[in-house]
Amino acid sequence: MPDHAAADGLRFAVLGPVLAWCDGVELDLGTPLQRSILAMLLLREGHAVTPDEMIDGVWGEDAPPRALGALRTYVSRLRTVLEPDRSPRTPPRLLTSVGRGYALRLDPARFDLAVFERECGAAESDRRTGRAGEAARRLRGALRLWSGEPLAGAVGPYAEHQRDRLAERRMSAVETLMELDLELGRHAEIVSELVALSAEHPLRERLRAQLMLAYYRCGRQAEALSVFTETRQALVEELGIEPGAELADLHRRILAADPSLAPAPPPVRLSHQDVQDDAATAETGPAIEMPRPAQLPAAVPDFTGRAGLVRRLLALLRGEGAGEGVPIAAMSGIGGVGKTTLAVHVAHLAGDLFPDGQLYADLRGYGAEPTAPETALVAFLRALGIPMDVIPDGLAERSALFRSLLAERRMLVLLDNARDAEQVEHLLPGSAGCAAIITSRGKLADLPAARLVDLDVMEPEEALSLLAAVAGPERVAAERAAAMDVVAACGFLPLAVRIVAARLASRPSWTVASLVPRLADERRRLDEMKIGNLAVSATFALGYGQLDARQARAFRLLSLPAGSGISVFAAAAVLDLTPAEAEDVIESLVDASLLEAPAPGRYRFHDLLKLFARRQAEDAEEPAARALALRRLLGFYLASAGAAHRLAYEGSAIADNLTGLGVLGHSFSSADEAVAWLSAEAEDMFGAVAQAYDSGEDLLAAADLLLAMEPLLESGTNQRDFEQRTSALLTATRRAGERRGELRCRYVLGRVLFGANRLAEAEAHFLAARTLGEETGDHIVLGETCNALAVVAGRRRRHTEALEWFDRATAVHRETGNPAGEALASCYSARDHLGLGRPDDAIAAAERGLAVFSEIGSGAGVARARYHLGNVLSHVGRLNEAVVHHAECLAFFRASNQRVWEQRVCYRLAATFIAAGRFAEAARHAEQALTVSREITHPYGEAQSLAALGKALASLGEIDRGRDALVKALDIFTRLGSPEADDIRALLREQVET
């Protein structure tokens, strides 16, 4: 096993698990996807990798819609891991941005693959110059860098391909080494190695030939010939081919006892030899023989995973990075996460480091009667040979005697299940030769000199391995997909996985798949996780029982929201506290390992712990109290989203027309901050909407929340969530007869469908919304709906009808005193004036809208007006002015992350540059538009961008590439039923004719 961690600075390894160290300490590289991205950057050896290459290499065809965002997050996390002290304003030195891509700058001497290739190259040079012994020595050293399957822990198509390539590269080096050893007359020494290699790779003819030659040179001719027979049989059966010429020739020469097969004379040995490691010498023990306690519980025989953490803990126990003090590892984590199992496992592995023994105490910190430190010290002192009658009475005196006995000795103390720092501080050794491991549910941050280790749940593959170890590897391998569903339902919590696996093992007639529906029901899931005296609920109950009334209430109520996490401000609404009060009680739950804090100001439950907390809420909280907590949360989200909408759409009257639930929300200083908040809280707000339609309560407020979240539609994200949640809420509002709520749902759903270019469906919802708006007298949403109907008609090239709808929208906006609505209708109508051949009216309409938006100070409105004015000016040939307007609005849309608008403007710039004959710039902007449309999964925009790109490339003389882009655009437009398909079809015919 290579000791990569021994050197200072950063070091990387891929010849085994994907790992990294800094100054000898292993770095936490995160999830398999994050490791895969790092591996890809490492293997590209400083060359830039584009986002598209990374997404294809890591996710392949299964890339999620927001893969680019996830990629950027993983890159950001890797930068933090590799350069933790870097200021956010300082450009990264290692993982740098290069154009649109990323590159990892590192010294090849700190990368095991680069060192391996360097040593293999040097070995080849030595061999060519006749220094076979030096070449073999170098190759053996290079092969010692390998520690298992290459790129272990990395996933995706790129890793799989590279894993095969690296494995082949290693085998090539192994075969070369075997050849050198045969040249050096070491046939007897390598026979056993060749036997093992040949068994592992039975179809590698070179290895088989080397084994035949080694056997022959050892005087074992019959076995050499037998290898040929076995190899020929395997090749014929597996591949249907005969052995190659080299193997057949060697077979013939062995049969003929060819003298040239005899080994060469042994080389003259030089005075220098391979350096042997010095054996470590142990200190002699004290003059007086004392007992050697060995109190550790038995290690778990099927311990699985945690390899990186085990290495870190062993390094800590060896004193690496601990200075002159006593190494103390204080592990914390939720009940059932495997703290004791890991601690005992590491303690057994570290046995040789502590020849004078190990002491163990279960402090029962979360039981009804925690072990007093005085009692634990009596047990320790007795184990060290001190008679009961001479043990002092006081805690301080017992602790002093304990430390004195451990002085000049090397002992490990394992303090399990501690309640707090006060319980353990007198039980710790005082001499540097000793070490301690502490496990606790709470974080012992106030324990001096302790290295805090926060234990998380297992990685999915680790959990799968544990399930297989307990339930049987054959059963799990036969139903891998179902097994992954099972461990996911367990939240990858080791105790839950072990219990479920034990139930499976005790029931041979069960299949793994039969467990999936049992665990799918959240209300029954915890009940399924118990066997004998083991139960997940009982473990959680110990921690819950230690909470005071205020903490217990917060624990219960915070489990009610449906989102995956919650911000401190949203939590304050649920708890009916100020943000400062809420943060105080929530942080105490984090310290008790009952909540997690994945980011500053955000909190979440482990999935199983959340189910347990909800069960406690159902038992301890009245239904009205639970409903009121969720209503406060919905009110907070609605008020906050309304404030965000007001800033994002300056001048819009929507935000002033929302329902209020009497809860204050967030305030924002800018539109950018508001939209960023909407994006960060989107999942939780969709969860609040889902809970509203499930309960049938506050349906109008939930519909208003979706309406207030409208700015997110401009980013192109969350389209699926919008459609699913709005459709479900629409059903609930219709069932309840909530007409205003139905109006809002239909308007929002129409907008979502329009963004997906499902124009007929969008129009149907807008028409229904128009009727509802007139019936309910809600003229604010009615005006927006008429405007939306006009845009749909225009997209479908029904320009006269579109202008009629714009006139109705303008009339409604004027009646309600909404100048921004009038301006928006005027801007949008410009396209339809153009469609009817009235360019002057189009310019006047766009300029009128721009003037109004400028007057009321709406940045978003001005950007949209510039977009429409730029389109009109481009159409009439005022190309330079068009570019200026589009460049201005593009800067705004990019700064505010409005990706849909960014794509539209890039496409329009491409069209303008085509008209200007600046085809290279047109192609560049078309490619930018294409990239954005694909990142946000916007097929209509993708087709637009491909069409522009095809025209630009054809004009640049790249006929084949241009035609390919046009054909792709035609395919998408045809699938969408867009009229643009006819335009592209005509253009392709024209190209063929010319």
Image (tube, rainbow, N blue to C red):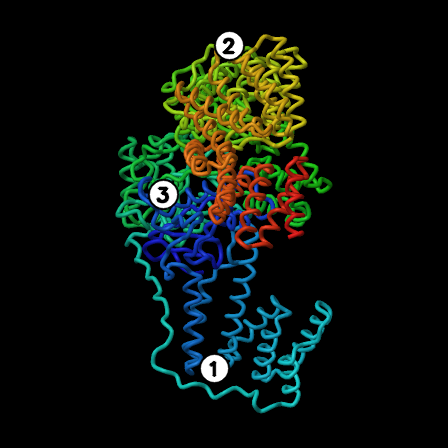
Determine whether the residue tagged by mark 2 lies in a helix, strand or loop. Answer: loop
Circles 1, 3 touching at the beta carbon (< 8 Å): no
What element does badge 3 sit on?
strand
Instruction: Categorize mark 1 by other alpha carbons within 10 Å: few (<14), some (14-19), many (20+).
Output: some
Task: Give the CA separation, mark 3 to mark 2.
Answer: 73 Å
Q: In the displayed structure, does residue 370 sit left or right of residue 457?
A: left
Q: Up-down: is 375 above or below 359?
A: above
Nearer to us in this view, 852 or 745:
852
**Marks 2 and 3: in contact by CB < 8 Å?**
no
Q: Label for residue 816?
A: 2
- Which numbered tag is attached to residue 184? 1
Badge 2 density bin: few <14, some 14–19, many ≥20, Cα 10 Å: some
For residue 436, the mark is: 3
Q: Amino acid at mark 2?
A: Thr
Per the image, label 1 sits on a secondary structure element best described as: loop
Distance from disc 1 to disc 2, alpha carbons, whole Å, reads 96 Å
Q: Residue 284: image x %, image y %?
A: 30, 58
988 relative to 754, above or below: below
Check disc 3 and give the amino acid type.
Ala
Q: CA distance from mark 1 to mark 3?
A: 51 Å
Quadrant of the rendered image containing residue 216: bottom right
- Say whether disc 1 or disc 2 marks the residue closer to the N-terminus: 1
Say whether residue 208 is left or right of residue 396: right
Instruction: Point out the image quarter for the N terminus.
Output: bottom left
Q: Is residue 616 something one can see in this rendering?
A: no
